[in-house]
Amino acid sequence: MKGQILDFSVQKNEGVISAADGARYTFSGSEWKGDVQPNRGMWVDFEAQENNAIGVYRALGQAASAPRGNKSKAAATLWGAFLGGLGAHKFYMGSWGWGIVYLLTCWLYIPFITQSMGSNTKHGV
């Protein structure tokens, strides 16, 4: 049966799945068969046994990354326009790796900016 995780409590080591048939099933953390921790909103495949879900797996084709949430494209555009050279838009959208790459390479823009501003003091101009 297929469904979506409504909630998972790490403290209690149990969660609730809303199945495609409209019923809700509880599951124990010991029934989780995935390689990542179950998260709210994750699509799963499981077997129903009374009101319990057993053998709970993450549904095939679902990305392993954590959900990004609702991010505004307008806000990302503004971040990119004002602080894009520092990778602020990448951090906002959840691409931490690319954001770090931007931060590590932002110093490469300095010679380009000084050259285009005409502040080249080497040649006395």
Image: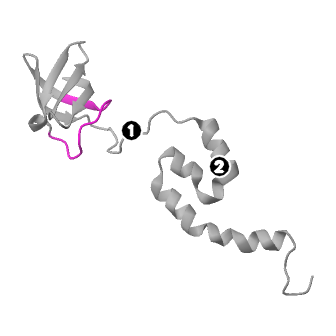
Q: Secondary structure at mark 2?
A: helix
> Of 30 and 46, which appears nearest the observer?
30
- Residue placed under numbered mark 2 in the picture: 80
Residue range (magenta): 33-45
Q: Residue furthest right?
A: 125
> In which image quadrant can residue 43 be found?
top left
Going 16% across and 28% down the picture, which residue do you hit?
46
Dot 2, how many residues are within 10 Å of its Cα: few (below 14), some (14-19), or many (20+)? Answer: some
Q: Residue furthest front?
A: 11
Q: Residue furthest left?
A: 49
Going 61% across and 59% down the picture, which residue do you hit?
86
Which badge, 2 or 1, is on the more N-terminal residue?
1
Q: Which quadrant of the figure contains the N terminus?
A: top left
Residue 93 in percent (x, y) is at 51, 45
- Residue 94 vs 3, above or below: the answer is below
- Residue 12 vs 114, above or below: the answer is above
> Of 1 and 100, which appears nearest the observer?
100
Mark 1: amino acid: Pro
Residue 3 in percent (x, y) is at 25, 24
Residue 17 in percent (x, y) is at 22, 23
Q: Secondary structure at mark 1?
A: loop
Dot 1, how many residues are within 10 Å of its Cα: few (below 14), some (14-19), or many (20+)? Answer: few
> Of 68 and 63, which appears nearest the observer?
68
> In which image quadrant can residue 4 be found?
top left
User: Magenta region, mostly helix, strand or loop?
Assistant: loop
- Residue placed under numbered mark 1 in the picture: 67
On whether residue 66 falls in the magenta region, the answer is: no
Q: Which quadrant of the figure contains the C terminus?
A: bottom right
